[in-house]
Amino acid sequence: MKKYIIYIGILVIGLILGWLFFGGSSTNEETHNHSEEIVINEMWICSMHPQIMLPESGDCPICGMDLIPAETGSESLDSDQFKMTENAMALANIETSIVGSSNVKGNAIKLTGKIMENEEANAVQVSYFSGRIERLNVNFTGEKVSKGQLLATIYSPELFAAQQELLTAAALKESQPALYKAVRNKLKLWKLSESQINDIETSGKVQENFPVYATVSGTVSGKLVEQGDYIKQGQPLLRIANLNTVWANFDVYENQINLFKIGQEVLITTNANPNMEFKAKVSFIDPVLNSNTRTVILRAVLDNKTHVFKPGMFVVGKIKGIKSGKEEALIIPSTAVLWTGKRSVVYVKTNPNEPVFEMREVTLGNKLGENYEVISGLSSGDEIVTNGTFTVDAAAQLQGKKSMMNKEGGKTTTGHEGHTGMKSMNTTNISFGIRGNCSMCKTTIEKAVNSINGVASANWDVDKKKIDISFDETKTNEIAIHEAIAASGYDTEKINGDLSAYKKLPECCKYDHSMEMSQLVKE
């Protein structure tokens, strides 16, 4: 019996000591608080849409996939920095590059342009007397003519009367030589040759119809009259272009003007001969800026004896050896830059070992090929996002950090406020193809998009024929954007351009409808 009493006493003492050392109630309280801390700090993201960041687990409001826990450790970041998961980085194909100095002499600038007739070699064939066109020997535009070729036959009442005056004066030339000379000179003013005048005088017969001969050789670029028309003295009949030389006119932006000078070599390619390069030199830079497009015309004269170049053909010119204001400059790819109004921003990776980023405003200089010169905002050695920039910007917006549309930061959008899912996420980024040719097209297209309420930014790439747009989906939608572009006259991937608006576009903006959009748009 004493043995049992001893065992019970030991057990009671052990329970008392355990309670004193560990305290059952405090253990439960600490466990509960730790769980609360985990719930408060943990965020959940979608592996396919890293811009989705919710405070609790569940399904992605875009694709329905299960959300995964986001990486922690943001408590050590600065106020303007944010972190993405390695998984999200890989799925969004986000790439970064180190900013470095580049010798700007080795850079080349691409310009888009159009082949035009050489106005210096063009001629207008006119009639030197009034009358009716009895026969027109030129049937269509594009027909080739040679100097001295018969172009038309004209019946002219005043020329008929002048011939009668010649025959009368010829009979009196001995007694009135001044009158005879004056009548002959009158016929010469109407471009009748000495032999024609002599034939009339010798035959004594008045001709009813007179021929009009070509004064130059070339290609008929404009047929201005039809057979049977009545014409006045000096009225144009035909425009004749000499296409042995042509002009290549390129658009140069205002901030690029100082990079070019007369005599620079231009390497020119065409869609018709993409594997051939043609060399020419800059022969003219327009001294007047086009106030609508903010561009000037840069011109090169091309030898065209083989008729490779056709007026109206679109061309690309590459000018190498461009010199900036300084020998060395910081160069970044154009894919790294986001534009909003007057601001240009990039995203800098601040930790070389972890995907930590922050937004940085930059001041850009000239565009050199597919790159931009950086005037301020970055230093050599900085690591910036060069692919997937829109995705990184979306992550910054959702975490309340400085972003393209949130200059000061401090406003977080999770996409889960008020249990409305994606309706709370205002910013949407889209990219699609648009037909177009030149900088004037770029101005018109971007103006049409930016006129829509809710559009934050729009940038149409002339070379790739693609536009990148950021907009607030609570204020507008993708179809409305396509419709606005189409209303300005341009075809998009979804809607054909308005024909009446297209007809009002400048000639250089009228694009090739024969190419499929999939062939036109370049990645």
Image (tube, helix red, strand yellow):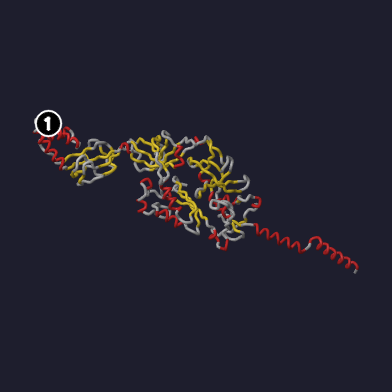
Return the residue at label 1. Answer: 177
Above or below for 457 versus 313: below
Is residue 101 something one can see in this rendering? yes
Residue at the image position 56 percent from the left and 39 percent from the top: 100
* Disc 1 packing (10 Å; few <14; some 14–19; many ≥20): few
Above or below for 201 versus 448: above
User: In the image, 387: left or right of 114?
Assistant: right
User: In the image, 126: left or right of 495?
Assistant: left
Quadrant in the picture for residue 295: top left
Taking depth in this image into account, of 480 and 51 the one nearest to the observer is 480
Taking depth in this image into account, of 101 and 404 the one nearest to the observer is 404
Quarter of the image with the N terminus in it: bottom right
Taking depth in this image into account, of 270 and 448 the one nearest to the observer is 448
The residue positioned farthest toward the top in the image shown: 174
Is residue 519 something one can see in this rendering? no
Q: Kindly state the secondary structure of the residue where label 1 is placed.
A: helix
User: In the image, 352: left or right of 168?
Assistant: right
Quadrant in the picture for residue 239: top left
Residue 364, horizontal then vertical, whole percent: 51, 43
Above or below for 36 versus 112: below
Taking depth in this image into account, of 430 and 193 the one nearest to the observer is 193
Residue at the image position 63 percent from the left and 53 percent from the top: 71
The residue positioned farthest toward the bottom in the image shown: 1
User: In the image, 292: left or right of 77?
Assistant: left
Residue 139, horizontal then vertical, whole percent: 24, 44
Above or below for 77 versus 8: above
Residue 496, horizontal then vertical, whole percent: 39, 54
Disc 1 residue type?
Pro
Residue 413, horizontal then vertical, whole percent: 57, 57
Q: How many marks?
A: 1
